[in-house]
Amino acid sequence: MNGKVLLLNQDYTAIATCSLNKAFVLLYLQKAELIAQDQVHHLRTVNAVYPWPVVIKLQHYVRVPYKGISLTRQNIMRRDGNRCQYCGSSRNLTLDHLVPRSRGGESSWYNLTTACARCNSHKGDRTPEEVSMKLFRKPFKPSLISFLRESIEDLNHAWMPFLAERARA
């Protein structure tokens, strides 16, 4: 069984994605409720047919401490769509510090971007402004919702109402 299922808290906020196996177990043990199912596929056993879950909601509220998205190489590249932010290439990708580390630049969401080896080498130990290189998108720290929405290759359309940014109070 392959596939991802959107996992919602009891208040319908997205928590994460989980495997189809995990979703089925949560449903079977009545720890979750089926919110949306695939209309084409079904899970079959010898004796029964079950709906193929796409979105499930936990029966009880789970307090999830928000730690933010981890600052990792994979997550920086995922945020940037696996494209060089200078030329748009998807080959030979590396990470680039906008303000070089030798000049006190930190490894942070706002100072790291994805760059191909050619652009990173051309930029060298300088800032993008010093070598007249423009970024396609300014680096930012993604929220959990935006990260889920942008990073999942096969985003299921049934997930969209639950991944919309909530208005901040």
Image (cartoon, grey):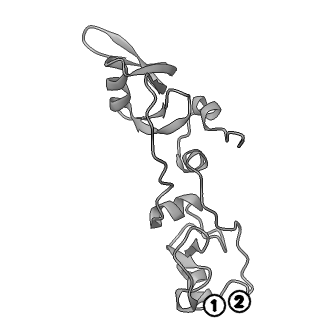
Which residue in the protein does label 2 denote?
A: 131
Q: Quadrant of residue 42?
A: top left
Residue 83 x/y as whole percent: 59, 65
Q: Is 169 drawn above or below residue 45 in the view shown?
A: below
Q: Quadrant of residue 116?
A: bottom right
Between 121 and 26, the residue placed more toward the observer is 26
Residue at mark 2 to residue at mark 1: CA–CA distance = 7 Å
- In terms of secondary structure, where does tag 2 sit? loop
Asked if residue 109 shows in the view, the reply is: yes
User: Badge 2: how crowded within 10 Å, few (<14), some, or many (20+)?
Assistant: few
- In terms of secondary structure, where does tag 1 sit? loop
Between 69 and 74, the residue placed more toward the observer is 69
Looking at the rendered image, the quarter that the N terminus falls into is: top left
Q: Residue at x 72, y 41 (%)?
A: 169
Q: Residue at x 49, y 49 (%)?
A: 66
Q: Amino acid at mark 1?
A: Arg
Which residue in the protein does label 1 denote?
A: 126
Q: Earlier in the sequence, mark 2 or mark 1?
A: 1
Residue 21 x/y as whole percent: 33, 30
Residue 161 x/y as whole percent: 64, 31
Asked if residue 38 shows in the view, the reply is: no
Q: Is 35 drawn above or below residue 85 in the view shown?
A: above
Q: Amino acid at mark 2?
A: Val
Residue 165 x/y as whole percent: 67, 41
Q: Residue at x 55, y 78 (%)?
A: 96
User: Badge 1: how crowded within 10 Å, few (<14), some, or many (20+)?
Assistant: some
Q: Quadrant of residue 31?
A: top left
Q: Residue at x 56, y 87 (%)?
A: 104
Do the numbered discs 2 and 1 sit on residues whose CB atoms are within 8 Å? yes
